[in-house]
Image (cartoon, rainbow, N blue to C red):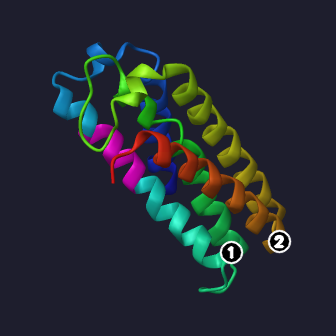
């Protein structure tokens, strides 16, 4: 099952290189795509956050499994923010401040890569530190670019 998910995610990542207009027939499709990717990412970040906060017991194997998904999913939503895909919970500032939005998306991908390294280290303190960085990047982007 995990292998099927990773293969599917890899194929989706490869599709990111195509223009957004070619990927989405309608604006609603792009919105649904990016919201779905963010939802899945949030579910797995939440599981890691629960471990980091001590709400659930730390399990290194589960941490790695979730961090792998987070690192892959963090690459997906950006294709859904192409020209003509305004709407949903996205603020218009995304399309006005492309450089800042791109910087934060790249920062998130880097932070989730570090999260995966921390999870693979099998160290709860490293996981906590990496989760802090991921959380801060998410908050910064959501504060600037997401409607409540």
Left or right: 122 with respect to 88?
right
Q: Is residue 69 above or below residue 23?
A: below
Callout 1 secondary element? helix
Q: Which mark is residue 32?
A: none
Residue under the point 42% across and 20% down: 96
In the image, is residue 57 above or below residue 63? below
Q: Is residue 97 above or below residue 146?
A: above
Residue 63 at least partly seen: yes
The quarter holding residue 109 reads top right
Residue that mark 1 sits on = 52
Asked which quadrant contains residue 28, the reply is top left
Q: Is residue 38 left or right of residue 128?
A: left
Query: Quick one: SS at disc 2?
Result: helix
Q: Nearer the viewer, residue 142 or 57?
A: 142
Q: Going 25% across and 18% down the picture, which residue do you hit?
A: 84
- Place of residue 97 in the rendered image (x, y in percent of width and height, measured from the top left): 48, 23
Q: Is residue 70 left or right of residue 145?
A: right
> On residue 125, which mark appears?
2
Q: Are marks 2 and 1 in contact (CB under 8 Å)?
A: no
* Main SS of residues in magenta: helix
In the image, the segment drawn in magenta is 32-39
Q: CA distance from mark 2 to mark 1?
A: 8 Å
- The residue closer to the viewer here, 85 or 40, is 85
Left or right of 112? Residue 77 is left
The quadrant of the picture occupied by the N terminus is bottom left
Residue 144 lies in the magenta stretch:
no
Q: Residues within 10 Å of mark 2 (few under 14, many from 20)?
A: few
Magenta run includes residue 34:
yes
Q: Percent x, y for residue 133?
A: 70, 54
């Amino acid at each position: 099952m995990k292998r099927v998910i990773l293969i599917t995610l890899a194929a989706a990542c490869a599709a990111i290189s195509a223009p957004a207009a070619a990927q989405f027939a309608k604006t609603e499709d792009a919105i649904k795509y990016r919201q779905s990717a963010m939802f899945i990412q949030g579910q797995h970040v939440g599981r890691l956050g629960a471990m980091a906060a001590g709400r659930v017991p730390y399990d290194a194997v589960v941490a790695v499994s979730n961090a792998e998904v987070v690192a892959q999913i963090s690459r997906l939503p950006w294709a859904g923010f192409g020209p003509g895909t305004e709407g949903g919970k996205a603020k218009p500032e995304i399309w006005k401040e492309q450089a800042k939005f791109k910087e934060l998306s790249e920062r998130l991908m880097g932070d989730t890569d570090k999260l995966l390294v921390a999870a693979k280290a099998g160290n709860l303190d490293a996981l906590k530190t990496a989760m802090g960085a991921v959380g801060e990047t998410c908050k910064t982007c959501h504060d600037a670019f997401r409607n409540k």
